[in-house]
Image: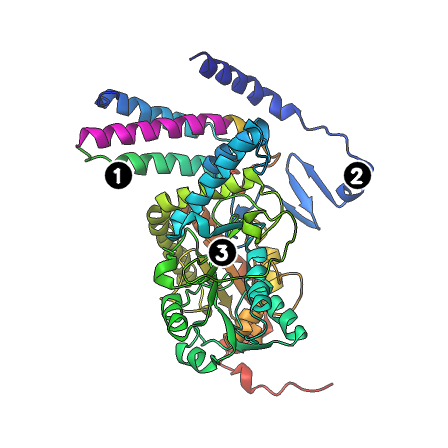
Amino acid sequence: MASRLHSSRLFQTLKTTSHTCRLRHLSTATAAAAKESYEDADGISMKGVKISGRPLYLDMQATSPVDPRVLDAMLPYYLSSYGNPHSRTHLYGWESDLAVEKARAQVAALINASPKEIVFTSGATESNNISVKGVMHFYKEKKRHVITTQTEHKCVLDSCRHLQQEGFEVTYLPVGSDGIVDIDLLRSAIRPDTGLVSVMTVNNEIGVIQPVEEIGNMCRELGVPFHTDAAQALGKIPVDVEKMNVSLMSLSGHKIYGPKGVGALYMRRRPRIRVEPQMNGGGQERGIRSGTVPTPLVVGMGAACELAMKEMEYDDKRISALQERLLNGIKAKLDGVVVNGSREKRYAGNLNLSFAYVEGESLLMGLKEVAVSSGSACTSASLEPSYVLRALGVDEDMAHTSIRFGIGRFTTEAEIDRAVELTVQQVEKLREMSPLYEMVKEGIDIKSIQWAQH
Amino acid sequence: MASTPSKSQILSLFRSLLRTARDFSDYNIREYTKRRTIDGFRHNRHVSDPSSIAAAYSDAESQLQIARRQVIVYSLYVPKLKSVMEIKHA
């Protein structure tokens, strides 16, 4: 009772004082950086763009906001229960260890695994590295071949390239124009010395769902370990390691409304898959991943997984409806809109659209009040069109204009409507300025034009 | 164990959750909490078994405590700019 009154009075005083905490002393380093951005009451200017408010967030595949319920579970481990879970001699260690084991069970429950099969890592990228490089290094005497797809996440592709430099052979399977890998092609690529097949469950750029159950069945039949990157799939579609017959699965915390900096790796015990550790040290996490397990982050990931299990159905229904609303809203006002990737085998919260006759960078710059991305955050630094879209066989010009809309648990209908309005406005504005579009409206076939050399 | 909560207790809990949701400074969290509360209570409208009602009630009570704490935490770190959804646009 008393604490509730106290907290409400505290809350009232905070409401009034928070608006006065604007002046801050900047260190010289931040002062230098601050010259490029300034904030005032009307808006914020950063990187030459002035916006009046925080953009509405539609980039859930890049990362997701931390759910307040997850934050609530994490805070005690930053405040008072700050022990190292590997300290065996005092209460701080014991309570921290209990929390880590509880989180482990929560993660395992979401994927129908045993807690003993979960290893905590720093993220899905680390889990992917351990899976690809760790497995191949362990079995390097007999197994020299890896199979993966052209649409995998950069960390998998880069690990494979590293293996190639070490002398292993890698087959990068092409995908169909809908983004789905061909099972028969995969079967024919498997050799007696194939040590690993790695196919991601849900693609981060286009959102297509690969037929992992079929691939898993086939790999088990042929005795090849199967690894899947389930970072985008976890908590969004039902993921079951028994049904999928996976030997290894990478999981990420910050895609399921958990904290950044934590992930997990599922490693099957029956039949046991062995890996060579990539992080050496004190032998934590069964020797697979040494280093102090970050209790607050791991607790956050566990809480996020438990929440995902409870909320999956509710979220899925809402997000599917919002995706329909977004797509129909845009298609009703614009033509020349193409959905990249299969329409049926897709996760509803990821919508990758290409707008014909519009340039991608200018569209993104114009959509300053909507936080979206083109392609994936990992590749957005370079100017190349996304390799995923190229693997789908999308034309260069359409690949350049792709926008990825990411819908999540906290997205509202009003945000979707506003995003539709702003996108349509921006695309129409750009098309009006585009001479190519004028030519198309007059009926000229762009592909038949002979561009003159100067 | 506590006896089955009465209808007025359930309604009072529902209203407390909505009132707490209103105090969130973040647009998305605020809307989500309101929506989830309404949908959650609506979903359990026809539950008749007393132990299930009691379980759902105590679950909602703990969610209320979490929400109250988080409203305070979010209010400590309000960003200077509001979301564009909260700014009236022409």
Q: Which residue is at the front of the view, A42 or A95?
A: A95
Q: What is the secondary structure assignment of the residue under circle 2?
A: helix
Query: Cα distance, mark 1 to mark 3?
Result: 30 Å
The colour mode here is rainbow
Circle 1 residue: B43
Q: Nearer the viewer, mark 2 or mark 3?
A: 3
Q: Are marks 2 and 1 in contact (CB under 8 Å)?
A: no
Q: What is the secondary structure assignment of the residue under circle 1?
A: helix
Q: Which amino acid does label 2 sit on?
A: Ala
Q: What residue type is labelled 1?
A: His
Q: Quadrant of residue A62?
A: bottom right
Return the chain for callout 2.
A
Left or right: where does residue A321 sit relative to residue A143?
A: left
Residue A306 spot, x, y in % from top left? 40, 42
Q: Which part of the image, by quadrant, shows the C terminus of chain A?
A: bottom right
Q: What stretch is highlighted in magenta?
A: B49-71
Q: Examine the structure image and report whether residue B70 is included in the region drawn in magenta.
A: yes
**Label 2: few (<14), some or many (≥20) within 10 Å?**
few
Residue A329 spot, x, y in % from top left? 40, 57
Residue A132 spot, x, y in % from top left? 56, 65
Left or right: where does residue B14 sit relative to residue A195?
A: left
Circle 3 residue: A231
Q: Can residue A361 be seen in this view?
A: yes
Look at 37% across and 52% down and name the residue there: A112
Give me the disc on residue A31.
2
